[in-house]
Amino acid sequence: MSDDLDLDDPTTDPFEVARAAAAYLAQATGVTQHDVALVLGSGWGGAADLLGETVAEVASTDVPGFSAAAVHGHVGTIRSVRIGETGKHAMVLGSRTHLYEGKGVRRVVHGMRTAAAAGASVVVLTNGCGGLNPAWGPGTPVLISDHINLTATSPLEGATFVDLTDLYSARLRTLAREVDATLDEGVYVQFRGPHYETPAEVRMAGRIGGDLVGMSTTLEAIAARQAGMEVLGISLVTNLAAGISPVPLSHAEVLEAGQAAGPRISALLADIIRRV
Ligand code: 8IG
């Protein structure tokens, strides 16, 4: 990679790196336009399999600006998938860079900027998270209605003011509920992590209006909005948040809940993406 594509260099334009990444993907996949982008979070690894035919798959590390997957259970590839009979293509980002990896916010949102540069007008952000509502057992998918960003940072650089009213598209949430009328929705609170919350922090999240706690998504959603994309966020509650659950949290529990919920969330995602 040439130095002018180094996201760590503050003089680099991150949108230029995103255009280079999109050009690389177009060349490597033979797909000149991706209409939808999909980010697979914890528990969602197999959920893209029903979307349609995989046209091409590339290692994320070969694409300008992308880093290797850091979390067990995350997939380090970017796939181009033909969506059912629609003639559209989805860019499936099999893993994300988290803020807690310490690689900087530009890398966290690089997938969003790449998707936008590749032509995507809609992005579906999925994640695994903790739930505050005891009715949401492990394996419950929940639509994100809004977020509270407790990371104390932003993907926007300089005096860039972006309106976040209706960040999580009402149109796309309605469409998701047409697919599955039982879907609840909630406010996602992003902590930096990588530790899980204390029970007191979970109580705070509830009092300030949160329903879900996690370590991703909000910065990507902001960058997606800046890039003009419509955002759908879906969380998979893989565990009850600390102090709500009588048992301690474990990453094994997270992976198990994802596996058990696999068939339901796969079908859900495929149906939604065929209709966006
Ligand atoms: I999966 O309970 C998953 N990710 N912050 N809290 C936070 N992130 C999470 C949790 C959780 N579960």
Image (cartoon, grey):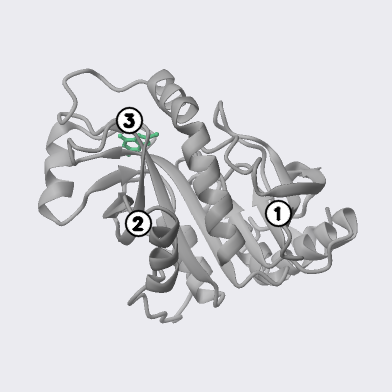
Q: Earlier in the sequence, mark 3 or mark 1?
A: 1
What's under tag 2, amino acid-wise?
Ile
Which secondary structure lies at badge 2?
strand
Q: Nearer the viewer, residue 186 or 148?
A: 186
- For disc 1, the neighbor class at 10 Å (few under 14, some 14 to 19, many from 20) is many
Left or right side of 98 for 200:
left
Residue 44: percent from the left, percent from the top?
52, 38
Label 3–label 1 contact, CB within 8 A = no
Q: Residue at left 56%, top 74%?
A: 227
What's under tag 1, amino acid-wise?
Gly
> Which residue carries the number 3 mark?
138
Which secondary structure lies at badge 1?
loop
- What is the CA distance from the residue labelled 3 to the residue labelled 1? 34 Å
Visible residue check, residue 105: no
- What is the CA distance from the residue labelled 1 to the residue labelled 2? 28 Å
Q: Residue at left 40%, top 52%?
A: 180
Residue 122: percent from the left, percent from the top?
57, 68
Disc nearest the viewer among 3 and 1: 3
> Which residue carries the number 1 mark?
65
What's under tag 3, amino acid-wise?
Pro
- What is the CA distance from the residue labelled 3 to the residue labelled 2? 16 Å
Q: Is mark 1 within 8 Å of ligand 1?
A: no
Q: Earlier in the sequence, mark 1 or mark 2?
A: 1
Q: Residue at left 42%, top 79%?
A: 162
| Numbered circle sitting on residue 76 | none
| Numbered circle sitting on residue 144 | 2
Q: Earlier in the sequence, mark 3 or mark 2?
A: 3
Visible residue check, residue 156: yes
Q: Nearer the viewer, residue 142 or 14?
A: 142
